Image (cartoon, rainbow, N blue to C red):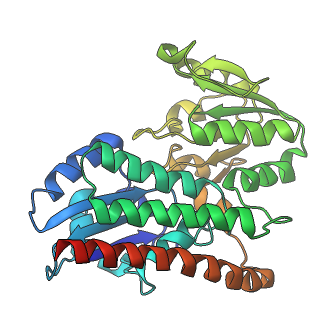
Amino acid sequence: MNIVMAGIDYRTAGIEIREKFSFTKKKLEAAYARILKNKSISGCIILSTCNRTEIYLSCTRGYRCNAFSVLCSAAEACEQENRKYARIESEDIFSYLCKLSCGIKSQIWGEDQIISQVKDALSFARGCNATDAYLEVLFRLAVTGAKKIKTTVKFSGENYGVCDNATKLIDSSLRRSGKILVIGNGEIGKLMALSLMKSGYDVTMTLRSYKKGKAILPEGVKTVDYAKRYGVMERFDCVVSGTLSPHFTIEKEPFAQLLHKPKILVDLAVPRDIEKRIGEIQGISLFDIDMIGKDIILESHAGKQEEIDLIVKKYKDDFEKWISYKEKMVI
């Protein structure tokens, strides 16, 4: 086995840098096709989220691979300019991935969304014929271990979701009263709408015309055509945007022309949905994912780490047994 990984995350790179390393599905497909032209690389999985972009490569025995160089090439980013942001995990890759999947490597300690993102990364890579047996088992067992951690270790009483943090931030200004527009009806948009409705807000979500009748939205949420978002924006006290769009969902010029501007704008996307210059408008508060995601590592986390480490070790042992068996079969 010869698995290497490298990446950038919120600990090494701000949102301006992480934006350069974000991947759309189309960009991922092209990246996998290019990477696997190298016959010394038998498998590749790229994990791209708001907090991080990481590449996992399964290589032939003895092949020395610069994983960060491969990632930069895939992201069309300059390796020399971004080398200072690189992170190559010193922890063994299985333990790291398992802990990452259960959320304790996230800005918000223990957040729930990352486990689905890791599973989706595996599934998408598989659909592109980019995985091999080693990466398949690595990711499957790491996710299984993460699920065990989530069901065994008590995280109660703490805040785990970026959507919950965003709602608390909005609460501090609107005090659970007002109308909020959520741009984007994907996973983040739906979670945000649910969190806001639980706090008592009147929530409207944008819906693109071609998705009408197809999208499954939270019960009780109102909808408006995405193309009409500027026309209705004056009705709202706050706008939250969390899409996978490569383009701004809110630009400064049309926003500046609004007579009644929402005072609070929350951007949950990487790359960002809301043009940064909007934050320069007087009276407007613009928050991005890094501002929302900051969390303090509590003393109670240290005790939970011991529980987590025991579970990780069990699944790591299973992974190593599988490797031993597979490599004996090859011999």
What percent of the width, then of the height, locates residue 141? Answer: 48, 65
Left or right of 181? Residue 171 is right
Residue at (55% x, 22% y) in the render:
226
Q: Residue at x 36, y 59 (%)?
A: 136
Q: Quadrant of residue 294?
A: bottom right
Q: Nearer the viewer, residue 158 or 142?
A: 142
Quadrant that contains the C terminus = bottom left
Which quadrant holds residue 258? top right
Query: Where is 39 relative to 317, above or below?
Result: above
Residue 128's place in the image compared with 223, above or below, is: below
Is residue 78 visible in this depiction of the protein? no
Q: Is residue 234 above or below residue 187?
A: above
Picture coordinates of residue 277, whole percent (x, y) = 52, 49
What residue is rendered at 65% in x and 65% in y? 148
Up the image or down, 17 lies above or below 219; here it is below
Could you say where residue 30 lies in the image, as x and y percent from the top left?
Answer: 21, 46
Say which residue appears at 61% left-offset and 66% top-offset. Answer: 103
Image-quadrant location for residue 64:
bottom left
**Image-based side of 294 in relation to 271, left or right:** right
Asked if residue 183 shows in the view, the reply is yes
Q: How many marks?
A: 0
Image quarter hosting the N terminus: bottom left
Residue 36 x/y as whole percent: 15, 57
Q: Relative to residue 44, is residue 37 drawn left or right?
A: left
- Which of the pair 40/317 is nearer the observer? 317
